[in-house]
Image (tube, helix red, strand yellow):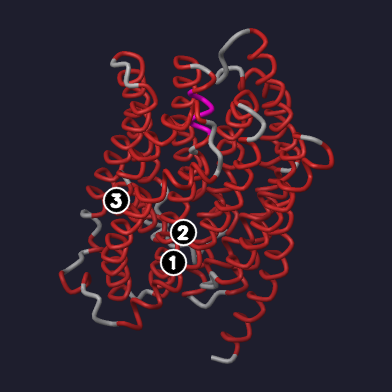
Amino acid sequence: MASHIKNMTEGKPAALIFSFALPLMAGNVFQQLYTVVDTMVVGKALGVSALAALGAADWLNWMMLGIIQGLTQGFGIMMAQEFGAGRYDCLRKSVGNSAVLSLVSSVMLLAAGQLLAHPVLNFLKTPPEILDHTLLYLRIMYLGVPIVMAYNLLASVLRALGDGKTPLHAMIVAAVTNIILDFLFVLAFGWGIAGAAIATLIAQLISSLYCIYYIRRIELLGLTGQDFRLQDRRFSFRLLMLGFPMAFQNAIISVGGMIVQFVVNSFGVIFIAGFTATNKLYGVLEVAATSYGYSMVTYAGQNLGAGKTERIRKGVRVALAIAFFTSLMIAFVMLFSGKNILSWFISGTEEEFRQTLQIAYYYLAIMSLCLPILYTLHITRSAIQGMGNTVLPLISGIAEFVMRAVTAIFLPMLIGERGIFYAEIMAWTGATVILVISYFAVIRKMERIFKNT
């Protein structure tokens, strides 16, 4: 059962990075598949207003998910480093401590989400005609925070050990479950937007149980009660100092996204629906970038633990080349097939359909042309995080927030409502500049450290 574990400190970097990323990519495709099906079912069955309601929840939902993913990915960095160094007692301790810290964090996040959902939606001036549906969707999703936390932690443990296949299998099971339940809850039972949220949470629960089943059979991870005790404060603090900056970084990025949503909400329901249709494809555009990023965190973490900094340099070079080629392929597909894909999400009168599709495709084309910037961002950020530095990526996240917010607020004043579409591109660009400079600074520092030891 443990044959999926992969040591990335030996072998050709290109083959290791790509082979590790490929199942993650496939898993992300299935994850995006059920996100897309959610949108399709809601948009087609319930109309433009329901689609807009789903879109109005996007950034608040992503903020919660981003905090969870940042925290668990940070925990996974220590796991990858301990595995690469062959310190298996510390590896088990990091897994056990991470589980306890994740449980406590999930309870706090659940409470915060329920308390703040309504006030934040009001602050963002969510249109009254979609406010109730958006709030209902968020409340259900926030109830599932412990489930989402569990899956992301378990997936981080597996990725830290070089296992990209088990999360893929878990996501396939989850995707199939979610799609079936979408049609059952939304169309057959008539539960509306709430049915889409419940279907997603049940799918996440099943994927978590699948990962638990597999992890319990990995001999290397034979955890004892001692591993779950937070007795070593320095050890727990080190975990938190890896996880918190990444969680805060994602939260800051989300706040920028909410500012964008605030501006978008002022443009009316049709514009919100078109903006939402393309945002639901954002995950598809980013799917390979995210997978390469996970691969680079594990690759850099394991090789740093083994003291092989030159392999990290080589890995980043080949990963950038692979990512650049992938981004061009995705851009080509979206530019030539984007209108057909977007039409799957949109319904309404002929005029509503035309206007929504026009808005959505314009936004999609802009993002597609700039994908190489986004892919460079993911590779460099993940390499820095894998080397144990989560502060510099946090600074890049702050830059991303500033660029996104300033562009969203001021550019529409100059060129009209379409100026909002460039907020994302400016955010990517600002963060990427900082990350490229930071990568070279961090790798040189690590080379000096290992040279003197």
> What residue lies at 41% left-to-right and 70% top-to-bottom?
78
Residue extending farthest to the top is 350
Q: Which residue is located at x 65 percent, y 21 percent?
A: 356
Circle number at residue 131: none
Residue at 56 percent across and 51 percent down: it is: 292
Q: Nearer the viewer, residue 152 or 219?
A: 152
The amino acid type found where label 2 is placed reads Gly
Q: Is residue 75 above or below residue 251?
A: below
Taking the magenta stretch, the answer to whether it contains residue 252 is: no
Disc 1 packing (10 Å; few <14; some 14–19; many ≥20): many
Q: Position of residue 166 (x, y in %)?
A: 35, 46
- Where 298 sits versus 410, above or below? below
Query: Circles 2 and 1: CB distance less than 8 Å?
Result: yes
Read off the residue under disc 3. Answer: 146
**Distance (Cα) linking label 2 and label 3:** 15 Å
Element marked by disc 2: helix
Report the amino acid beneath label 3: Pro
The residue singled out by tag 2 in the image is 70
Residue that mark 1 sits on: 243
Question: In what element is the residue under mark 3?
Answer: helix
Query: Tag 1: residue type?
Result: Gly
The mark nearer the N terminus, 2 or 3, is: 2
User: Which quadrant of the figure has residue 101?
Assistant: bottom left
Tell me: 356 left or right of 96: right
**Of 88 and 133, the residue lying toward us:** 133
In this image, 401 relative to 225: left or right? right
Q: Which residues are magenta?
A: 50-55
Identify which residue, 361 or 324, lies in the foreground: 361
**Residue at mark 1 to residue at mark 3: CA–CA distance:** 17 Å
